[in-house]
Amino acid sequence: MESERGQMFIGEYSHSIDDKGRLAIPVKFRGALASGAVVTKGLEGCLFLYTNEEWKKWADKIQATPTSQANARAFSRLMLAGAMEVQPDKQGRVVLPKYLLQYAGIKSSVIVAGLLNRLEIWEAKAWQEYKTTTEKDAAGMAEQLFI
């Protein structure tokens, strides 16, 4: 599905990581990632996977934060030092670096979740726990966000 801004990632997909650290990208997203992507440490213990175009937008926002602020420096380090360019192979798989798999606690079973401008890659059990907790307070979150 495409939006006016380009690829729109939506949906939830169960996949697995093979013994070489490869993840098969869901078929419907492969075209948007064909020219390469960037994977990095995400928030809440997942990984973020961006198209190159979306990564540039995200990196520009991070770069605009003031380096005089400790939180800005720490967030920059988390997102940028942990980032890795990835290129899908002919089967639509990307190799996820071991340090990112360790960060997210991923061993084999994963959930790939589409979140409009990025994919999130979660260890399957962690995703289920996060989703269960979040769904319980969906109405409260909506009230706070959409006042």
Image: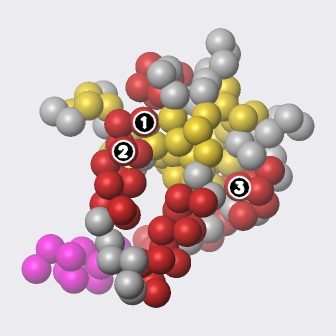
Q: Which residues are magenta?
A: 136-147
Q: Earlier in the sequence, mark 1 or mark 3?
A: 1
**Within 10 Å of the Cα at label 2, are there few (<14), some (14-19), or many (20+) other Cα atoms?**
few
The answer to whether any part of residue 105 appears in the image is yes
Helix, strand or loop status at disc 2: helix
Circles 2, 1 touching at the beta carbon (< 8 Å):
yes
Q: Earlier in the sequence, mark 3 or mark 2?
A: 2
Residue 102 image point, x, y percent: 78, 60
52 vs 123: above or below: above
Which residue was labeled with disc 1? 52
49 vs 8: above or below: below
- Of 7 and 87, nearer the camera is 87
Q: Which mark is residue 100?
A: 3
The N terminus sits in image quarter: top left
Q: Which mark is residue 56?
A: 2
Magenta span includes 146: yes
The residue positioned 62% from the left and 68% from the top of the image is 45
Mark 1 or mark 3, which is nearer to you?
1
The residue positioned 15% from the left and 74% from the top of the image is 146
- Mark 3–mark 2 Cα distance, whole angstroms, equals 20 Å
Image quadrant in which you'd find residue 101? bottom right
Residue 50 image point, x, y percent: 45, 43
Circles 1, 3 touching at the beta carbon (< 8 Å):
no
Helix, strand or loop status at disc 3: helix
Helix, strand or loop status at disc 1: helix
Amino acid carrying label 2: it is Lys
- Mark 2–mark 1 Cα distance, whole angstroms, equals 6 Å
Amino acid carrying label 3: it is Leu
**Within 10 Å of the Cα at label 1, are there few (<14), some (14-19), or many (20+) other Cα atoms?**
some
